[in-house]
Image (cartoon, helix red, strand yellow):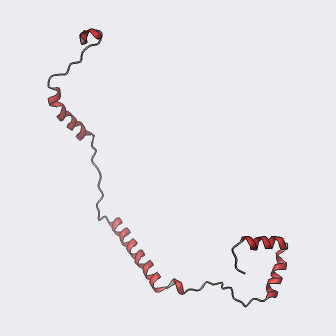
Amino acid sequence: MKLEDINPRKKTFTLPDGYFESLPDRVMARIQSSQAPTKTRPLASPKRIWSYAASIVLLFTMCGLMYYNDLSSIEPPHTYAEEYSSDYFDDFYETLNIDDYTLYSYLASSNTDL
């Protein structure tokens, strides 16, 4: 049995003359025509130079502020000292209008040091 006898209705394909010889040139022509020219921005445009300079000035300013203002020496504005009397807390508790169980539940669930 021959190959032509299996499917006699199907036509055979033929290649044009010089197809494989001209194929690389046609592929390169399509590649070059499909590539669009890319826009390149100049590295040293005035707007870009000003943005770089502003970033550097901001960085040095922040570093200088952190160096001259040692943040560890700043005390918080509200320090809880032993200067409050028990009468102050009793008066404050009376203004809250909550029962003892609610207060106890809150103090037991929170991580407060008394």
Q: Determine the residue positioned at 29% across, 12% down.
A: 10
Left-right relation of 77 to 107? left
Q: Position of residue 60 (x, y in %)?
A: 40, 78
Quadrant in the rendering for residue 74: bottom right
Q: Nearer the viewer, residue 33 or 82?
A: 82
Q: Determine the residue positioned at 83% across, 71% down.
A: 101
Q: Position of residue 24 (x, y in %)?
A: 18, 34
Whether residue 98 is visible to the viewer of this picture, yes or no, is no
Quadrant in the rendering for residue 49: bottom left
Q: Determine the residue positioned at 26% across, 8% down.
A: 5
Vertical relation: 85 (above or below) 44: below
Vertical relation: 31 (above or below) 91: above
Q: Nearer the viewer, residue 61 or 72?
A: 72
Q: From the image, which quarter does the N terminus lie in?
A: top left
Q: From the image, which quarter does the C terminus lie in?
A: bottom right
Q: Position of residue 103 (x, y in %)?
A: 80, 73
Q: Determine the residue positioned at 20% across, 33% down.
A: 26
